[in-house]
Image (spheres, grey):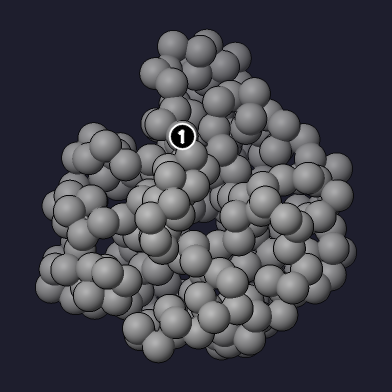
Amino acid sequence: MAVPSILQRILERKTEEVAAGKSAAPMAELTARAKDCAAARGFERGLRQALQHGPAVIAEIKKASPSAGVIREDFDPASIARSYADGGAACLSVLTDKDYFQGDNQYLVQARNACALPVLRKDFIIDPWQILESRVLGADCILLIMAALGQSQLQDLLGLAKESGMDVLVEVHDEAEMERALPLNHDLVGVNNRNLNTFLTSLETSERLQKMASAGQVLVTESGIKTVDDVKRMQSCGINTFLVGEAFMREAEPGTALQRMFF
């Protein structure tokens, strides 16, 4: 399976991180701790409930990215989470990758403690240890990136996440990955409009892959949603669930920007 170069570098670093994490907190320890965690808040349920009344927005808390550099200097995950909740977000997404997105596990903890919204852990999950780590951190949902995982690996991680009580957003980037996602019979699929080779975004990706979606699936359009016109364009092709971060993170009051774009 060919993996785009920037993603390959991220995954190599993530493998090192996981090895270090296992040394500090062995799998057995995380398994025991995960059993004591409170029930997840229901990420997919939150999206479906929002869709009954209008668009469902997953509002992202992100300090930086490889393509944009530092997006928000004044970065307080708790206050951003509260702003998003007040602005009408259905769920949150929190970047926890340190090296490439300047994220932190504690950002997820802080954001989730600050509001009642379900939270997606946005990271590069490649190992069962990370599934349990996510549950212990309080994640209600994890991201599994199709481009980073083989099919059997994807199925194993998907199964473990569900056993742990979390929802899963399976992310695809093109038709070949969408074809791989369909046999999973999984209802929550994200279409990343960003090309992992060039890091450029195109909303045409969502428009194309929406035609392949199964009935009943919640299809989330990710990356490149910057304006009200972008929202209307996605809605016109039948997509009404959005993951938006950078456009909000650049605004003084992220929740107000969300409300202005969607409501």
The residue at the point 38 percent across, 55 percent down is 53
Task: Pick the residue in front: 158 or 206.
Answer: 206
Whether residue 249 is visible here, answered yes or no, is: no
The residue at the point 68 percent across, 71 percent down is 210
Residue 257 place in picture, x, y as percent: 22, 73
The residue at the point 63 percent across, 30 percent down is 162
Residue 215 place in picture, x, y as percent: 72, 55
Whether residue 228 is visible here, answered yes or no, is: yes
The residue wearing badge 1 is 42
Q: On screen, 131 above or below 11?
A: above
Task: Pick the residue in front: 191 or 104.
Answer: 191
Residue 127 place in picture, x, y as percent: 67, 39
At label 1, the amino acid type is Gly
Residue 222 place in picture, x, y as percent: 52, 69
Q: Is residue 51 left or right of residue 192?
A: left
Tally of numbered discs: 1
Quadrant of the image containing the C terminus: bottom left
Disc 1 secondary structure class: loop
The residue at the point 49 percent across, 62 percent down is 241
